[in-house]
C-alpha cells in the first residue's frame, strides 16, 4: 500500500510536469527540451531557499518562477533571435546545468533537516487524523505521512488543472491556443505570434519548475541530474492521456494528461516490483513514445495497403 | 480622400542572388473609401505581393503605405490587423482547426483589440455569434461547439469571411479566396463576399485569377504585369468590360513578351 500511495503521489507530482509538456508539445506544437533543465532549476531553487531557511511555500513558488524564466529565455531565443525552436531548448537546457550547480553550490542538496511542504502536509494530516501514525483505510494500513502528502498533492494538482482549464477559455487563453494551432490566422487577428510563443513557453516551464520544486520536497533532495529524460516522460504521459480520454477538447485532455502521468507511474512501479532493471526504464520510456508516435501513421498505411489489396482482388 | 494610399512602393526578393525577383516596382495606387478593387495578373505578376505588402507579411524596400490616415509602412503584420480583415487563398489558413467555431469567431470579435481574462465565449457572445452564423445559411449555428477542422473548405472560407468582417475593417483583403474551392462552393462564397461588402460598405482589395469574377465584381480593375500596374480600369471603361476583353489584353501582353524574347535572341546571335 505504501508503494501504491507513493506511486500515486509521484504520478501526481509528475502530472504537473506533464501538463507543462502538454502546453508546449500539444498547444504550441513544440517539443521543448528546456524542461530537462527547468525541472532541475525549480528543484534546486526551492532546495537552496529551503536550506537557507525560507518558508516552504515561498521556496516552491520561487522554483516555479525560476522555471518560467527559463522558458522565457527559450522563447526569446526561438522568436526574437530566430534560433530553431528545438535548438533554443537545447541551448537553454545545457546552460541551465551550470546555473543549477551554481544555485545549489554542489551537485546535490538533501532536504531532511528542513521543513518542506511534505512536512507541512504531514503535520496537517496528523492534526486531521488525530495524531495517529498509521490509519486504516478500507482494510489497508497507511502511514499518515504518505496519505497526507498524497492528499496535499492531489489538492494542488486539482487546483492547477482548474486554473489551466479556465485560463485556456479566456480571451488571452484562446488567443494562445490559436497561436499554436494556426499562427497565420492569429497574426491576422492582431496577436503577436512571438509574444504568444514566449508567454506559452514561460507558462509551460513555470509548471515544470513547480513540478521540480515539489519533486525535490517529496523525495527529500534536489539533484543536478534529476531532469534527465523528463521531456520524454512528459510526452509519454500526454500520449497515454490522449489515448485514455480519446478526445480533443481541452478540459478532457488536461484530465487525461494527469491520468496518463499517474497510470504511467503505476505501471513503472509494477514493472519494477516484477524485477525490471531500473537502468532500462528510460530506454523503455523512449521506445514507448516512439511506438506511440509512429503507430497512427503505421496503422493508416497498413489500412491503405489492405484497401489496395482488396481493390486489386 | 483615399482610404488606401500606396506611394512608389518597391520590393525585391532575394536581392543580389541569382533568384532575385523584382516583385513590385514603383507601384503607386490610391483606393477611395468603400471602393472595391480587383487585382488581376499572371503568375509572378506581383498581384499577391501587392496584397501582402499591404497586409504586412514583409516590409517594403521603399515607398510608403497609408491606410485610413495612418502611415503603416513600418507597422508589424499583427499591428496592421487592427485596420485590416483578411481571407486567405488556402481555406485552412483562416481558422484554427482544433478550436470550436464559437472560439474562432470570438477570437475574431476582438481583432486588434486588447484581450483580457474574461471568458472568451460568454453567453452574450454566444447569442450574437449564433445570429451572425445563421446569416450564412449553412446550418452551422447548431454546431458552434464543433471543431472547425471538421468542416469543409467552403464552410471554413465562409466563416473566415465572417471573421474578417466581424469588426468592420477599414480594408478587406481577399487573396484568391475561392481559388481552392470547387466551382459551386466558389460561387456561394463569392455571393457571400458580395453581400458582406455591400452591406458594410467595405473598402476591398481582392486578388483573383478568375476573369469572370473580375468583371462581375468590384468597381475597378487593376492589371499587374512584372511588378507594375499595367492597366487601371474604372468608370465607364470598366463598365463595358467583358471577360474576353481582359483575356485579349493578357494575350497582347504575352505576345509582346514573346516578341521581346525573339528580339533578344536575334541580338544575342548577332553580337555574341
Image (spheres, coloured by chain):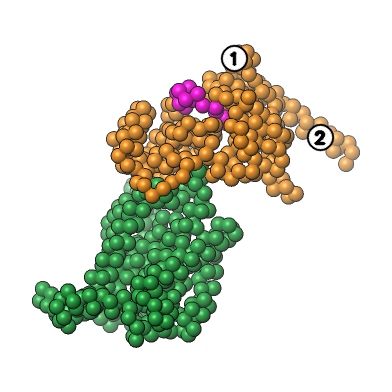
Tint of chain A: green
Q: Residues within 10 Å of mark 1 (few under 14, many from 20)?
A: few
Give the letter of the orange chain. Answer: B
Q: Which residues are magenta?
A: B193-210
Label 2 lies in what chain? B
Q: Are marks 2 and 1 on the same chain?
A: yes
Q: Residue at x 72, y 34 (%)?
A: B8
Q: Which of the numbered marks, if any, corresponds to residue A50?
A: none
- Examine the rendered structure and indicate whether residue B115 appears above or below residue A94: above
Q: Position of residue A303 (x, y in %)?
A: 35, 52
Choose between B162 and A109: the one closer to the eye: A109
Res A239 seen here: yes
The residue indicated by pointer 2 is B264
Secondary structure beneath label 2: helix
Could you tell me how far apart the alpha carbons at marks 2 and 1 are, in whole angstroms?
38 Å
**Which comes before the other along the chain, label 2 or label 1?**
1
Res B98 seen here: no
Q: Tell me which corner region of the image, top left, top right, bottom left or bottom right, holds residue B233.
A: top right
Q: Which of the numbered marks, if any, corresponds to residue B239?
A: 1
Q: Quadrant of the N terminus of chain B?
A: top right
Q: Position of residue A72 (x, y in %)?
A: 50, 62
Residue A240 is covered by the magenta coloring: no
Q: Position of residue B63 (x, y in %)?
A: 71, 38
Q: Residue at x 37, y 67 (%)?
A: A17
Horizontal side, residue A55 vs residue A143: left or right: right
- Examine the rendered structure and indicate whether residue A135 appears above or below residue B173: below
Residue B196 is covered by the magenta coloring: yes
Amino acid at each position: 500500500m505504501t508503494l501504491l500511495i507513493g506511486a500515486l503521489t509521484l504520478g501526481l507530482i509528475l502530472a504537473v510536469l506533464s501538463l507543462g509538456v502538454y502546453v508546449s508539445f500539444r498547444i504550441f506544437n513544440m517539443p521543448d527540451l528546456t524542461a530537462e533543465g527547468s525541472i532541475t532549476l525549480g528543484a534546486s531553487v526551492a532546495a537552496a531557499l529551503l536550506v537557507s531557511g525560507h518558508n516552504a511555500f515561498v521556496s516552491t513558488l520561487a522554483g516555479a518562477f525560476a522555471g518560467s524564466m527559463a522558458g522565457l529565455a527559450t522563447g526569446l531565443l526561438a522568436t526574437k533571435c530566430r534560433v530553431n525552436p528545438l535548438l533554443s531548448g537545447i541551448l537553454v537546457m545545457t546552460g541551465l546545468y551550470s546555473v543549477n550547480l551554481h544555485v545549489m553550490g554542489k551537485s546535490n542538496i538533501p532536504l531532511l533537516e528542513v521543513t518542506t511542504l511534505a512536512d507541512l502536509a504531514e503535520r496537517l494530516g496528523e492534526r486531521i487524523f488525530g495524531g495517529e501514525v498509521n490509519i486504516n483505510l478500507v482494510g489497508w494500513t497507511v502511514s499518515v505521512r504518505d496519505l497526507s502528502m498524497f492528499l496535499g498533492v492531489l489538492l494542488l494538482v486539482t487546483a492547477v488543472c482548474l486554473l489551466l482549464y479556465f485560463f485556456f477559455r479566456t480571451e488571452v487563453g484562446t488567443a494562445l491556443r490559436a497561436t499554436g494551432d494556426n499562427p497565420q490566422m492569429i497574426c491576422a487577428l492582431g496577436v503577436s505570434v512571438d509574444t504568444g510563443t514566449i508567454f506559452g513557453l514561460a507558462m509551460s516551464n513555470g509548471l515544470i519548475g513547480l513540478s521540480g520544486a515539489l519533486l525535490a520536497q517529496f523525495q527529500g533532495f534536489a539533484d543536478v541530474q534529476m531532469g534527465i529524460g523528463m521531456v520524454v516522460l512528459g510526452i509519454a504521459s500526454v500520449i497515454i492521456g490522449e489515448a485514455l480520454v480519446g478526445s480533443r477538447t481541452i478540459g478532457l485532455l488536461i484530465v487525461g494528461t494527469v491520468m496518463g502521468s499517474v497510470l504511467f507511474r503505476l505501471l513503472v512501479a509494477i514493472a519494477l516490483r516484477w524485477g525490471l532493471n531500473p537502468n532500462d526504464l528510460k530506454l523503455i520510456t523512449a521506445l514507448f513514445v516512439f511506438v506511440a508516435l509512429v503507430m497512427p501513421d503505421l496503422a493508416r498505411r497498413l489500412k491503405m495497403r489492405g484497401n489496395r489489396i482488396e481493390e486489386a482482388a | 480622400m483615399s482610404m488606401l494610399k500606396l506611394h512608389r512602393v518597391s520590393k525585391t526578393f532575394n536581392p543580389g542572388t541569382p533568384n532575385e525577383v523584382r516583385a513590385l516596382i514603383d507601384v503607386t495606387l490610391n483606393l477611395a473609401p468603400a471602393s472595391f478593387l480587383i487585382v488581376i495578373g499572371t503568375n509572378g505578376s506581383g498581384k499577391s505581393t501587392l496584397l501582402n505588402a499591404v497586409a504586412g507579411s514583409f516590409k517594403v524596400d521603399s515607398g510608403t503605405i497609408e491606410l485610413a490616415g495612418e502611415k503603416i509602412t513600418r507597422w508589424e503584420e499583427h499591428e496592421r490587423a487592427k485596420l485590416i480583415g483578411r481571407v486567405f487563398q488556402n481555406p485552412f489558413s483562416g481558422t484554427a482547426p482544433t478550436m470550436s467555431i464559437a472560439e474562432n469567431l470570438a477570437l475574431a470579435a476582438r481583432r486588434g483589440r486588447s484581450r483580457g481574462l474574461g471568458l472568451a465565449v460568454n453567453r452574450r457572445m454566444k447569442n450574437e455569434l449564433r445570429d451572425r452564423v445563421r446569416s450564412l445559411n449553412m446550418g452551422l449555428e447548431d454546431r458552434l461547439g464543433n471543431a472547425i477542422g471538421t468542416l469543409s473548405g467552403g464552410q471554413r472560407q465562409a466563416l473566415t469571411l465572417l471573421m474578417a468582417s466581424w469588426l468592420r475593417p477599414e480594408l478587406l483583403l481577399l487573396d484568391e479566396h475561392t481559388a481552392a474551392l470547387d466551382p459551386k462552393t466558389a460561387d456561394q462564397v463569392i455571393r457571400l463576399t458580395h453581400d458582406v461588402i455591400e452591406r458594410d460598405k467595405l473598402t476591398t482589395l481582392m486578388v483573383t485569377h478568375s476573369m469572370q469574377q473580375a468583371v462581375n465584381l468590384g468597381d475597378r480593375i487593376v492589371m499587374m504585369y512584372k511588378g507594375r500596374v499595367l492597366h487601371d480600369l474604372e468608370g465607364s471603361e470598366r463598365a463595358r468590360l467583358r471577360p474576353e476583353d481582359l483575356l485579349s489584353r493578357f494575350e497582347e501582353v504575352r505576345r509582346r513578351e514573346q516578341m521581346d524574347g525573339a528580339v533578344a535572341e536575334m541580338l544575342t546571335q548577332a553580337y555574341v
